[in-house]
Image (tube, coloured by chain):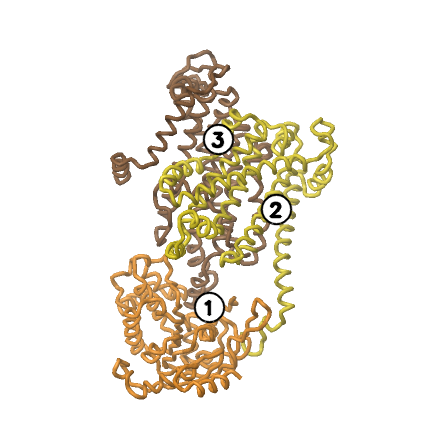
Amino acid sequence: MTEDAGFTTAADQVAAETEGRHGAVEVKDASCVFHHRKGHLVHALRDVTFSVEPGEFVCIVGPSGHGKTTLLRVIAGLQAPSGGSVTAGGRTVEGPGADRPMVFQQDTVFPWMHVRDNVEFGLRSNGIDKEDRRRRSDHWLKAVGLEAFADSWPKELSGGMRKRVALAAVLALGADVILMDEPFGSVDYFTRRSLHELLLELWAETRNTIFFVTHDIEEALILADRVLLIKNGQLVDDLRVNLPRPRDEDVRARAEAVELQKLILGHLGFGADVADNRRMVSEARS
Amino acid sequence: MSSGRPTVALLGAGTRAVGRTVRAIGIPILGIALFVGIWQALSLRVGIYTFPSPPIVLRHIGDNLLHSEYLVSHGLSTGSGYIAHIAFTARNVLMGVVIGSALGISFGLLSMRSTVLKEVITPLAATFGAAPIFVAAPFFLIWFGIQPTAQVLMVAFYTTILLFIFSRRAAENVASQYIESALTLGGRGKAIVRRIYLPGAIPEIRGGFRVALAGAWGLAAIAELLGAEQGAGFLIKFFATAFVIDGMFAMALLLGIVAVVFDRLVVLGFTYLTRWSEAGRRLGL
Amino acid sequence: MAPVRRVLESIRRPPVSWITWGVIIVGWEVAAHLAPASTVRNSPIVPSWEFVFTDALRQLSGSWPFDYWAPNPSRGGEETYLGAFLAIGYHSYQSLLRLVVGLVIGVMAGVGSALGISYWRFARRLVWTPLNFLRMVPLLAAIPLFQFWFGASMTGTTVFIAFGVWVLLMVSTINAVNNVQDRYIESARTLGASRRWTYLTVVVPAALPELRTSLLLAAGLSWSLTVGSEYIGLPNGLGNILAVAEFNTNTGRMIIIAIIIALYALLTFYFLDKLFRRLVSWVPTLGDGSNLSRVAGSAAIGVPADESISV
C-alpha cells in the first residue's frame, strides 16, 4: 500500500503558492506495473505524459479497468508509479496530502462523526484552529445546501446528500487540485445531474484544477474543459472541449459536440467506421 | 515514489513468491518465538516450580506423551502415555460435534421452510445457547452416568444449539435472489433446501463449526474433571490433586495444540467445500 | 414504558415461544411424575416443580453461611425461605462481583492492548499466531492451574476471568482493526491526515462496531469461567452451591441454580448489548435488534470474527 511520506499542512500549501504555478500538474512518463497472481505482469499505465494548467477541469475517460483510476491514484499519491514522475504545484508527489484531496467512488463519509465534523476533518487534521474551521465548514455546508444537517449523523442522510458532504469536506480544504474518482457513479441519474450543477457552480467560484474520472461520455461533456482518453493504460488522446457553458441539451446537440462524441467513441473502439476504429485501436496498443 | 525506482513487481514472479512465502511462514514463527520468549522470561521471574519454563514442559511432554512411566507407576495406565487420554477426549469431542452439527444444521435449514419449527426452536436455542452450557453438565452426569456417553451427549447438545443458530442465520443471509431464481426455474421445497440453502450457507456454517469445536474441548475437559476415569480432564484433575504442575501445564499446552490442529483441519476441509466462492478464496489462508 | 407495552401486547397474542415454554414446563412435570422413584432422599431423578419450589428451595438456606437474619441449618436451625433467598443473594453477589470486575478489566485490557499494538501492521501479524493459540487453549481445562497460581479466591477467580476475556477481546480487536475498510483510511489520508491522526480518529472508531459479537461472547465466556471456577474450587458463589447440590445429588436445588444462572446470563447479555449500542449510536445498522432472543442468540454465536483475517 502507500508509504507514509508525512502530511501536507496549510503551511506547506502556502510554501507551494510562493513557488508559483500552484494548481498545475505535470505527469511525465508515468508507468504502473502490477504483478498478477498467476505470474505475468499487468501494465496498468504505460508512459502517460501530459501537463495541466491551473484551473482546468480535466476529465479522464475510458473503459473500466483500463487505468483511469490507477492514474488518478498515482496523482493522489495513493499509488507509487513504477516509472516516471508526477509533480503538483511544482513539487514531486510522494504521498497523499491535503493539497490533492480526493472524492471517492464509494461512500467515505465517516459514519461516526456528525456531518459538520466530517466537513471539518481535513481542516482539523491540518491544524486549522476552531474558529477558522467553523467559518469554513459553515460556508461550505451552505454552499452544498446542507447547513440544516450540520449536526446530523451521516446515517440520517440519503446517498446523494452524503456525496454532497464528501464534496464539502474536500472543498473546505481550499486545495488547488481536487481529485474525483467516478464520484457520482453510485447515485441515480437525476441526483447525478443536480450534483453536476452543484459542482460546476462551486468550481466557477473556486477555479481549482479538477481531475474527474468517469466512463460516462455525457458526463465528461457536461463537465470538462479537457478530456484525457485512457485505453489499455495509455493516453490515447488529449482533447479540448471548447463548447460554451452551461453545457445544456442544446449545446450538447450541436454538431461540434456530436463530432467530439464520435471521436471519443471512435478512439475507444466504437462507432460507424469499424475498420478505421480497429486500426486506431491496434495502433494505440502497439 | 519518484522517477526511476522499479516496482517490486518487476523483480520477477519467482522472487516475489519466495518473498511472500517467507513472510507467511516467517512471521508466525517469529510470533511463536516471541511467545516462547515471554514464557521463558515469566518462568525465570516467577520460578520454575510455579511456572515451568518451556524446556521443562517440553521435556515433560517428550517423556510422557507416548509412553508414561509416571502414569504406569501410579496405576493409571498399562503403558500408554498422555496421548491415549487425549485421544479419548478427542474421540468424544468429535463424535459429539459431528452428531450435533448434523442435527443442528438439519434443524436450522429445515426451519427455513417451517415457521412452526423456527418459532419453537429459536427461543430455546437462544436461551440454552447463551447460558453457560455446562451448567447442564451435572444433570447430564446424573442422568447418563460418568461414561463417555454423558460427555458425547453434552457436546452434541451444545453443538446442536450452536449450529442451529448459525445455519439458520447463514440460510437467512443467502441472498433472496438465488432462492427466487430457483423458484422461477421450478425448484421446490426439499430440493431448495438441499441445493440452494445448504451450499449457500456453508461458508458461514464453517464459523459455527469452529466455535462449536473450540467450546467442545472445554466442555469435554470439564466434564472429565468432574468425574471421569479417563481423558485429558481426568489427567488434569489427577495432576491437580498431586500438585504435578508440569503435568497440568503440559496438558493445557497439548490441548491447545490439538485444538489448533483440529481447527486448521476444519478450515482446510471447508476451503475445499467452498472453493467456488468469493469468500472461499479468502478462507484458505 | 415501551418494553412493558410490548409485553402486554404479546400477552394478547401469545407468540409460539410462550407455548413452547409452556409445553416444556408441563412436560417436565409429567416426566417428574413418570420417572422411577429415586431411592435417595431429596434426589428425585426428575424433580417436580412442586418439589423444586418448596423443599429444594428451602434447602438452599443451608448455603447461607452466617448466623444472623436467618437460622443456620448447618448448626441445627430450620430451613427457611428467608434463609434460601438470603443464600441466593449472597452467592449471587459473590459470583456477580467476580464476573463484572473480571469482565470489565478483561475488556479494557484486551481492547486497549490490541489498539496499542494494532497501530503497526507488522506487530499485528507478529502477535496474531501466539494469541490465536492462546485463545484455543480450553480455559475450562486450565481452572486447576489458575487456582494453583492465583488461589481459589475472589481475587484469583477475577484474575482468571479477566485473563480469558483479555485474550478473546485482544484477538477480536486486532481482527476488527485489520478489517477496517481501506476507503476510509485512504479518504482520511487524501484529506491530509497523518498516520497517527488517521489511526485515532478513523481506524479506531471504524473498528469498534465489529466488537459487538465478541463482547457478547466474552460475557458468555465469563459466566462459564466464573461458574466453572466456583464449581471446582471455591467456597462460595453460584457455582459452589451448584457443586454442593450436585454432591448431594439434589436435583431440585440444581435446577433452581441453573435457572438463576441462565436468567443472570440473559440479563448480562441484554444490558451489555444496550450499553454497547449507546456507545456506538452512530452506526447505521448494528443488526439483531433489541429482541432478547436474538441478542442471546448472538451471544451464543459470538463469532470470533477471525473468519476473514488474512494476516
Tell me the kind of residue under disc 3: Val
Circles 3 and 1 on the same chain: no
Residue C217 visible in the displayed image: no
Which chain contains the residue that carries disc 1? Answer: A
Q: Residue at 65% across / 68% down in the picture?
A: B14
User: Helix or strand or loop: what does disc 3 sit on?
Assistant: helix
Q: Closest to the observer: B231 or B63?
A: B231
Q: Is residue B278 left or right of residue C81?
A: right
Is B275 situated above or below B9?
Answer: above
User: Helix or strand or loop: what does disc 1 sit on?
Assistant: loop
Q: Which chain is yellow?
A: B
Is C152 situated above or below C71?
Answer: below
From the image, state whether disc 3 or disc 1 is nearer to you.
Answer: 3
Q: Is residue B221 left or right of residue C261?
A: right
Which residue is disc 3 drawn over? Answer: B135
Local crowd size for mark 3, using a 10 Å CA cut-off: few (<14), some (14–19), many (≥20): many
Q: Residue at 63% across / 41% down in the picture?
A: B253
Q: Closest to the observer: C286 or C165?
A: C286
Which residue is disc 2 drawn over? Answer: B261
Which residue is disc 1 drawn over? Answer: A7
Q: Which chain is orange?
A: A
Q: Earlier in the sequence, mark 3 or mark 2?
A: 3
Q: Which chain is brown?
A: C
Q: Residue at 56% across / 52% down in the picture?
A: C128
Residues tagged 3 and 2 counted as in contact (Cβ below 8 A)? no
Residue C15: numbered disc: none
> How far is the residue under mark 2 from the one under mark 1?
45 Å
Circles 3 and 2 on the same chain: yes
Q: How many marks?
A: 3
> How far is the residue under mark 3 from the one under mark 1?
56 Å
